[in-house]
Image (spheres, helix red, strand yellow):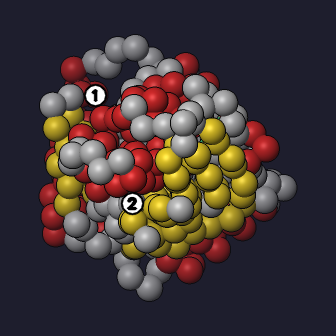
Amino acid sequence: MLTVTAPATSANLGSGFDVFGVAFDRPLDVVRVERAPETTIEVSGVGSQYIPTDPAKNTAGVVAQELGTPARIVIDKGVRPSSGLGSSAASAAAAAVALSELYDTDHTREDLVWVAAEGEAAVSGSAHADNVAPAIMGGFTVVREDGVESVDAKVPLVACLPETVVSTREARGVLPSTVDLSTMTETVGNAATLTIGMHRNDPELIGQGMAESTVTPARAALIDGYERAVEAATAAGATGVTVSGAGPALLAVTHQGDQRAVAGAMVDAFESIDIDARTFSTMIGSGATVH
Ligand SMILES: Nc1ncnc2c1ncn2[C@@H]1O[C@H](COP(=O)(O)OP(=O)(O)O)[C@@H](O)[C@H]1O
Ligand SMILES: N[C@@H](CCOP(=O)(O)O)C(=O)O
């Protein structure tokens, strides 16, 4: 079978709601495909009991439908579902690259971003592409309606995943529908600062540019221990901390050498209120890889 891996990703980075994303080095989903008369899905791995095998409800199955590439699709989940680490996107991204390769379609990686986003639409109710873009293209990505830009940034990150579940669909439901002008100006300034930081591989600028005051507080309210974990990570040297995607994971940016301290501080903060948490220390990584 043809094997493709796609990584966990973190979307939004605070100031880039539905626009910014970064690829991790790990964890990864492994997707194997072979041609078949009709699409079937098998799922194993982390949280697989919560993932539908009906192709119409699984992001990888929706991708097969969109591409017109029926296949037996075998998914080994490394990215826990409903984590804020792009679990549904990792499968969609890996499936898009695998099926395109299997059927030798002439899609570019950017084309496949929009195909994989249809898989996301099927599970979250909106075709946001900010997880599938880095999962397919790697690096730091910027998604607009008419294109995807990517920067091969190298910056240390720590993701902290508490043992709670927040679905993207639920976390989109708590968002305000409007922002005022001064908030918009502040957010544009922060997003631009973050983008310059990515170009310079500068954790200070990226951390400052992650600040955001509309989406982040609404989502933080769904995560027990959020403020405590942010304070602990900041005291341990994180240059910025925000909600990863729709949560419940948190994303911290650090200087080289500070990841271990920041990871430990966040785990301790959650454990102090009896919530288990695990961390992933990673650099910004590559996108989907054919093996
Ligand atoms: N291949 C898949 N991998 C993970 N989740 C999937 C997949 N296909 C469908 N889902 C569904 O998507 C939801 C998880 O997606 P989402 O809430 O966006 O979380 P995440 O932030 O981890 O992507 C769950 O309801 C899950 O059952
Ligand atoms: N922009 C989306 C990103 C959702 O990411 P996920 O990893 O939680 O699926 C949003 O903020 O809703």
Location of residue 148 by image quarter: top left
Left or right: 78 in relation to 60: right
Q: Earlier in the sequence, mark 2 or mark 1?
A: 1
Q: Mark 1 is on which residue type?
A: Thr
Question: Residue 131: x and y, percent?
Answer: 41, 45
Question: Which element carries disc 1, helix, strand or loop?
Answer: helix
Label 1 near label 2: C-beta < 8 Å? no
Ligand 1 lies in which image quarter? top right
Q: Residue furthest right?
A: 274
Q: Which residue is mark 1?
A: 183
Viewer-nearest of discs 2 and 1: 2
Which of these two is toward me, 49 or 11? 49
For the image, the number of numbered tags is 2
In the displayed structure, 120 sits above or below 26; it is above
Q: Is residue 197 above or below residue 103?
A: below
Q: Residues within 10 Å of mark 1 (few under 14, many from 20)?
A: few
| Residue topped by disc 2 | 288
Q: Which one is nearer the viewer's eye here, 202 or 234?
A: 202
Q: Is residue 174 above or below residue 256?
A: above
Which kind of residue does numbered mark 2 sit on?
Ala
